[in-house]
Image (spheres, grey):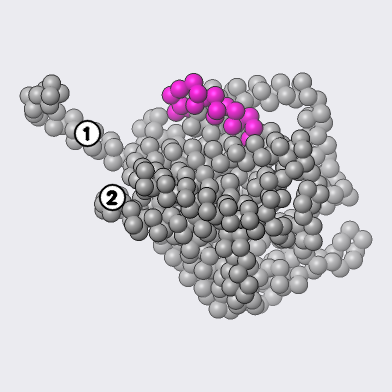
Amino acid sequence: MVAVCIVDILVVLLLVAVVLGNGFERALPVFAFLVVVLPLEARIEVPGMFRLTAYRIAVATLAVLWVAFGNRAPRSDKLGAFPLMLLMVLYLGWCVVSTLNSVVLATSAKVTLSLILDVYLVAYIFWKSVTRIETVHKVLSGLVAGLFVCCLFGVVERYTGWRVINLFPQIQHHFMPGVGGVTGTGGRLQSTFPHPILFGNALALGVPLALYLLSQAKSLLQRAWLWLAIVLMFHNLYKTMSRGPWLGLALSLVLLFLFSKGPVRKSLWVIGVLVLASLIIRPGVWHTLRNTYTATADPDSPRGSSYQYRYDLMRIGLHAVTADLRRALWGFGPESFYDLGLETQSATDKTVPVESCDSAVVEIMVETGFVGLLLVTALLTQSSWLSLRRFLSLPKPANSLSLVFCISIVAYGFMMLSVENFGWGQQTYMLWILMVLSILYPRLVEGVSANSAGLEAQRTKFPRRFAEAARA
């Protein structure tokens, strides 16, 4: 508990110091860094009410500082309405409907309230406060820096067995019912995340961001730390032993290679050479990858049964919601999956309880029905589609970041098929920040282009005035 209190105090002091010293907008990259680093274990339980996590302390502090010091210029009005707002409101409204019909009303109400205060509030503050392209880049740097720190914790964890989350009170996650600590995940790297798979999800998002920042780096020091971050992220992702994130990152890198040009593609060639060299120098890496594939294809192996479990989970979820038309529409209520007592057949044909939901798609479908799943799909689809359109319409090289946003959101949606990664964990907050920035960035680029065009027109119309200003 002492460690939790120290972390909470440091979070508040850091955000306040940045805002007072540099203005509110400079606090957004710091907040992005904290989103990644802060573990869910850093929390204070208020019995019967809520969990006061360090993340919520950061959100509350950010909200108070925004009210006191935030930008009041009508910048967002000039950029138009937030395109995702309608879908966000519809999804929230549907969560309310699902909550009113929930089998665990109190729990569902807390989760719906968390959606407003933990997610939507942050999205709104970012939408209202980001006014410069520089801030977008700094927020991305904050996310990558947070993952870099998590990777350093991962290296310590790998070679010493000590985990930073052991400093905080141990909590039980649905991923690991009844177990925890170093042995709870089989020695796979976890860092500050609730589970190695979620850590892998975040790293799969972080590598493309780091590659983009590397293409924009101006100094040798920036390039050096970004390359170090990329190497560490690959190392940590490999050690999470999580197949979904591996495939998610592979999908991202393939799409980046096909559609990006210039520095990003050159960096991908370097990464390809480094990966190939690793497979040659360390044949154990290749053997591990090959054995993982072979085990996944074998239904009698633990990895094979884990892979098959995803299909069984979809079948169980579909059976649960289609048994009643009302449940098919609005589900059983947010965060209700583990209270339904769902069962499946084991390899020995014994009936066993479903203790984990290794698919965000199945969880959303069961808890908020097909309508809730449709709205979440629409949110991800619209944000990725808008980014793709901006990639095709913005001038080069400014459009490269829109491509990275699009690929990151698509990869995240792909990873949702095989892990419960939506609505909790640091990677969820990363996703929402990226979705907001994906809408903001191209509009800021267009605003800068319009201002430049207007300035050039004025320069052409009044050349003497500009010449005098230049001399002054």
- Residue 445 or residue 153, whichever sits in front: 153
Decide whether residue 232 is among the magenta residues. Answer: yes
Q: Is residue 69 left or right of residue 231?
A: left
Q: Residue at x 44, y 34 (%)?
A: 400
Q: Residue at x 64, y 32 (%)?
A: 232
Specify the segment rendered in magenta. 215-233
- Kindly identify which residue carries mark 2: 75
Question: Which corner quadrant holds the C terminus?
Answer: top left
Q: Residues within 10 Å of mark 2 (few under 14, many from 20)?
A: some
- Residue 334 or residue 331, whichever sits in front: 334
Secondary structure character of the magenta stretch overall: helix
Secondary structure of the residue carrying tag 2 is helix
Between disc 1 and disc 2, the foreground one is: 2
Q: Is residue 470 left or right of residue 79?
A: left
- Kindly identify which residue carries mark 1: 453
Question: Which corner quadrant holds the N terminus?
Answer: bottom right
Secondary structure of the residue carrying tag 1 is helix
Q: CA distance from mark 1 to mark 2?
A: 19 Å
Decide whether residue 200 is among the magenta residues. Answer: no
281 w.r.t. 34: above or below: above
